[in-house]
Image: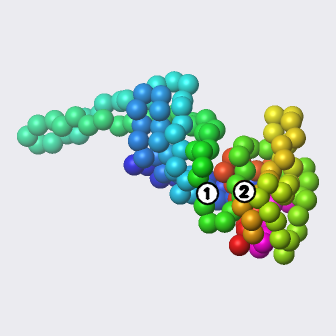
Amino acid sequence: MQQFKYTINGNIYHVTVNKLEDTLAEVEVNGTPYKVLMDKPVKKQAKTLKRPVQALTTTTIVTTPLPVASRPAGVLSGGSVKSPLPGIILSIDCKVGDAVKKGQKLLILEAMKMENTIASDREGIISEIKVNKGESVLEGADLVILK
């Protein structure tokens, strides 16, 4: 298991690589599990450790940078509405204290030159808006917190 800490656009991401097999990696980003399909198989490199009596061979895993992973279906965490894909916030159509219903438009996210309406996945009251207009976000980033 390998652990990494990345800061991207001021957001901190704790990444844990749990399992690597051929072109599939099982990772966690800030506690959310992802299955990542890589375009090249993982390279394995053998290295030897010298001991007085015998040489012991171990395997070290060398990885290429992980591509963007798809978000697991149906995973919700702690009342937050998360970004389904990386993009730029075009507009925020809610404010802290607003009561929202399931399916109500919260904001618009531009991704791959397309506008995507991000709607509430549950009823609640907006307790925090974690993004600003014009800000870039990664997939899985918290956008709005509902209580």
Q: Are marks 1 and 2 in contact (CB under 8 Å)?
A: yes
Residue 8 covered by magenta stretch: no
- Residue range corresponding to the magenta coloring: 125-133
- Work out whether mark 1 precedes mark 2 in sequence or the reverse, and give the earlier one: 1
Q: Where is residue 109 in the image (x, y as percent from the top left)?
A: 84, 47
Mark pair 1, 2: CA separation: 9 Å
Compared to 63, does 101 lie above or below? below
Disc 2 crowd rating (10 Å Cα; few below 14, some 14-19, many 20+) is some
Q: Position of residue 60 (x, y in %)?
A: 35, 37
Residue at 50% over, 46% down: 27
Question: Outermost residue toward the left?
Answer: 53
Check disc 1 and give the amino acid type. Leu
Q: Nearer the viewer, residue 22 or 97?
A: 97
Dot 2 corresponds to which residue? Answer: 121
Q: Is residue 45 visible?
A: yes
User: Which residue in the protein does label 1 denote?
Assistant: 76
On screen, residue 6 versus residue 47, left or right, reads right
Q: Is mark 1 on a helix, strand or loop?
A: loop
| Nearest to the observer: residue 143 or residue 123 | 123
Image point (72%, 56%), residue name = 121
Q: Is mark 2 on a helix, strand or loop?
A: loop
